[in-house]
Image (cartoon, coloured by chain):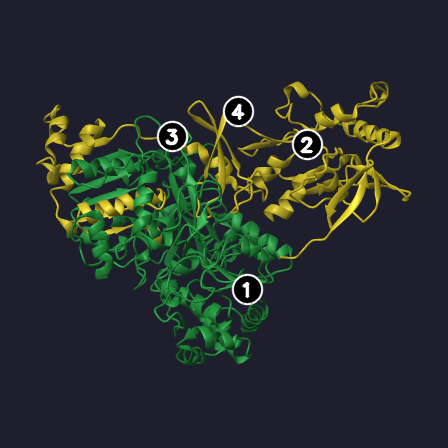
Chain colours: A green, B yellow
Amino acid sequence: MAGLAASFGSGAMTNSINEISDAACIFAIGTNTTANHPIIGRQVTRAVQKGAKLIVVDPRRIPLCRMADIWLRLRPGTDMALLNGIMRVIIEENLMDTSFIEERCEDYDAFEASIMENDLATAEKITGVPAQDIARAARMFGSYIPATILYTLGITEHSHGTDNVRALANLALLTGNIGTPSTGVNPLRGQNNVQGACDMGALPNVYTGYQKVENEKVRRKFEKAWNCKLSPSNGLTLTEMFEAAHDGKIKAFYLKGEDPVVTDADTTFIEKAISHLELFVVQDIFLTETARLADVVLPAASFAEKDGTFTNTERRVQRVRKAIEPKGNSRPDWMIICDIAKSMGAKGFDFGSPQKVFEEMRGLTPIYGGITYERIEKSGLQWPCPDHEHPGTPYLYSKRFSTPSGRAKFAPISYRPPAETTSHEYPFILITRRCAFHYHAVMTHKAEGFDELREEEHVEIHPADAATLEIQDGEVIKVTSRRGSIKAKTKITEIVPAGVVCMTFNFAETRTNILTSRALDPIAKTPEFKVCAVKIEREESAYLIKDYMRWGTGKHKS
Amino acid sequence: MIRVSSVSLNINGITVRADEGATILTAAQDAGIYIPTLCYCPDVSSIGVCRLCLVRIKGQRRLEPACRTPVEEGIVVVTDDPEIERLRRVILELILSDHDFNCLLCPKSGQCRLQELVNRIGLNEHRFNRLEHVAKDLPIDTSNPFFDFNPNKCVQCTICVRTCHEIVGNDAIDMAYRSYDLRVSTFANKLLKDSACVSCGECMERCPVGALVPKKTEYPTREVKTTCSYCGVGCGLYLGVRGNTIVKARGDDESPVNKGNLCVRGRFGYNFVNSPDRLSLPLMRAYDEYAQPSSVVKVTEEGRPVTLPLVKREGKFVEINWDQAIKYVASSLAHYKGDEIAAISSARCTNEENYLFQKFTRAVLKTNNIDHCARL
C-alpha cells in the first residue's frame, strides 16, 4: 500500500470489481485469483469470454494460465526486471499515452532514463522469460485500452515489495490506464476487512482515513474529540513490534483476531519474542496457536454474532448483521474493548451499539463522512464519500491524484535481487501460497468438509527435481531453510518450475513459516514470504505427517 | 447509456412490449405469461435443448424454442395450442422414462422443476405406463464433502455444465458419452473430489432437479443479510438461521459485488461459527497452580501476579469469569507506560472494532504502537 500511496497519493484498489469484466486487457501478476479471490476470478473469466486479452505473470502454472493469451513464467522475485523490460518496449515502440503523461504526471524524465539503463537481454537473463515474450506482453498491454492491473501478495511479499508496486503504478501511468473505468492498479486484498482496518487507523502512522499522526493539526483534532493528549511520534509496525518484544523494549502485547505464530514469517523468532513478553493478552474466537502462548485469552464473538461494517477491497463499506447470539459466553470485540477501557477509568467509551461508534468515527474521517448505516442498508457505498449527497466513488483519480500537486509521480526504480538467494547448500527456492480450499490457519479447518478436500500440507516439486533427488510422489521429505526445518509430503507436479518448491501455510500441523525469512521491505515492512532458499532431503523413517502434531486442529489421533 | 429500442409483439392475443434483443421467453415472462422451461437458466446462455418452451410463431412452419428466439416487431406468438401441448407431454414423458423418480426420498422434492412441469403440463398416464422405464442405476458420486451428484436424477439440461464454464470458468464438468449414455461427467469420469471441481456449489444452486443436492438440507427459519467474512471481496450473503445455529448460506442477488455468486468458503465455510472448539469463557494462566491451588482468583483481582517472570507460560489455562478477566487485563495493562505496550488489531474484525481498538491504544494506552496484518 505504501507503494501506491507514494505514486498516487492513497493506497487502495483504484477501480471496482465489476469493472474488471469490461476491461480489454488484464495484467494479472502475482495473483492466483481463481483460488484466492474466486468471485474476482469469475470477473476475469467473463472478461476473457467477452474477448479481453489476459497476461498472467507467475512462476507457478496457476489455473488462470489456462485462459491466458500470454503466460510469463518468471523466476521468483524478479518481477521488477520483467516490468522494467515491458516498460522499455512500451517506450521504445511509442505505445505510451504521451498526453496523459504530460497532463497528469510528473518526474517522467528520470523514470525514462532509469528504464533505458537496462535492455531486454538483461531482463531475459534475470527473469528467465524469453525477450520476445516480454515484448509481446508489452505490445499487448500497450495496445488494448482499457487495461487493468491485478496483483496480490505475489508482488508485495518481497523484500522489495514497495518497489514492485511502484513499478506497476509506473506501468499504469505510462499507458494512461488510470482514472477511467476498467483500468487502474488493483491490489486484491486478502482479509475480509483489511481495507477497513487500514481505513480505521489500525496503523502506527495514521489515524482514521489516513490522517497522519505526525500532522499537528490532525492530532489536535483527535485530541479535542477524544479529550486527551496523544503521542506525536509514529508507532512501530507489526514486524518491528516483535523485534522490540524480542529485545525487551516492549513488555506487554494486546493482540486481537490474529495468529502470527502460524501466519507470520520465521515462526521460531515470533515464538521467542512472545516468550520475552511480561504480559500477553489475546482476544480470539478460537484457541489459536498464538493464543496458546497467552497469559489471558478473551473469547470474542464471530462475524455472525455482531453488528458492524466491513470495507471490502474495492473500498465499499458494507453492513455486517447479527444473525445469532454469541456462542457460549463469548462477547463482541467492541464490547470487550469498551469494558477494559472503562475499567481503566477512560472516558469516551460509552457506546450502546456499533452504530454509535460508526457515527463518532465518520465525524472524524472525511472519506467516510457521508456514509451512514441508513445509506448502506441495501448495498454499501465506496469511499471517498465526503457528504450525504455524494454517491460514492467507483474509481479513483478521475480528475486529480491525491498527491500534494494533484499529479501522479513516476518513480525511477531498478531491479534488486531478493534478499535471500539460493546457494550450493540451499539450492531450491520456496514460495508460499494459500490453497483454494483453506483460509489462513483456523477458520476452514473448524468448518466441516474442508479438511476432506485438502487434509494436509504437501510440497509441490517439479518431476525433474524429484527424479534427481529420487523422491516418490507422496513421500515425506524434510524441507530445511537457514532458519529451521519441517516435514511434509511431496506432490510431484509441473505446476512449479524446476528449482522451485511451493507450500501453503494453511496447516497448523505443518508450520511452513518456520522456514520463511524476516527480511523486510524497507518501506512497507512486509516480510519476504515469497522467496526463501531451502534444501530438500529424503526422510528415511517415513511416517505420516497426518498423525504428527495433530492437536492443532482438535482432531488428535494418538 | 445505450438506449435500447423496444418492439411490440403479440403473445396469445395480448400485445406485449419488449426490449430489442430480448427473447420471446423473457418477453412472455415479463408479461406474466407462463412458458414451461427446464434447461433455461437466466444466469447462463440459453441452448434450447429441452424443447419444452417450443412456441408457434404465426407464418413460420416450425415451432421455435422461446428461450432462443429473439422478439421481432409485429410477430404473433402462440404459447400453447393442442399440438404444442401434445408435444410437451411427449417430451416430458421421454425425460421421465429414464428418471429415477422416488420423489418422496428426494431432497429436492417440493422444489423440483420436473415435479412442477408434470403438474403444469400433465401426463398421459395410459401412455406413460406403457413406456418402458429404464432407470439408469449409475453410481452416486458422494465424494464431495458438500454436495452429492446423482446421475440417475439428471435430466441433461446442462445448466451445471454451462454454469461451470460461463460463470465459474472452471470447466470441471462437461457432457460425455452418447445417446442413452449421455451424462454429465468430470474429465476421465473421475470422482468430483479428484477432479478440477472447486466445490463452489454454483451448479448445485442452479440444478433444477435432484441431481446435484447439498449433503445438508436443513431449512432455515429466517435469513439475515450480511457480508461474507472470508476474503477481501466482501460478497453479499444471506445466512439462514434455525434456532441459534447457522444452517445455510446463499449469495445475495442484489449485491453489486457478487450478484448472488459465492465460492466454496462463502457457501460452505460458515460452520466454523458453530464449532465446538469455540472459546466460551475467558481463560487465564494459573501460574502457582500447584503451590497455591486457590490463588487464581486472588491473583486476577490484584492485577499482575508477582511470580510471573519466573514461571511464565508454564501454568495451565483456567476459566475465569468476565468481571475477573476485564479487571485483570485493565489493571495489568495499567502497569505499563506508553511505548512499552503494543497492540495488534485484526483485519477480520469490523470497522467499528478497529476504530475503537486504535482509539483505546492511542487515547488510553498512550502509544501509537498499533498495527494489523495488512503488510503480511
In the image, B238 versus A68, the foreground residue is B238
State the separation of the CA atoms marked 3 and 1.
Answer: 52 Å
| Above or below B140: residue A142 | below
Give the chain of mark 3. Answer: A
Query: Label 2 vs label 1: CA separation?
Result: 43 Å
**Mark pair 3, 4: CA separation:** 31 Å
**CB of mark 3 within 8 Å of CB of mark 1?**
no
Image depth: mark 3 or mark 4 in front: 4
Please give the residue where the numbered disc 3 appears in the rendered image: A557
- In this rendering, which labeled residue sits more in front, label 4 or label 1? 1
**Label 2: which secondary element:** helix
Q: Residue furthest front?
A: A389
Label 1 packing within 10 angstroms: few (<14), some (14-19), many (20+): many
Question: Which three-letter amino acid code belongs to the residue tagged 1?
Answer: Ala
Give the chain letter at badge 2.
B
Work out how far the residue at label 4 is from the one at label 2, CA to CA, in angstroms: 23 Å
Chain that bears disc 1: A
Whether A113 is drawn above or below B48: the answer is: below
Q: Label 1: which residue?
A: A147
Residue B181 x/y as whole percent = 76, 35
Residue carrying label 4: B218
Amino acid at circle 2: Pro
What residue sits right under mark 2 in the picture?
B151
Mark 3 lies on a secondary structure that is loop
Horizontal and vertical percent position of residue B369: 22, 52
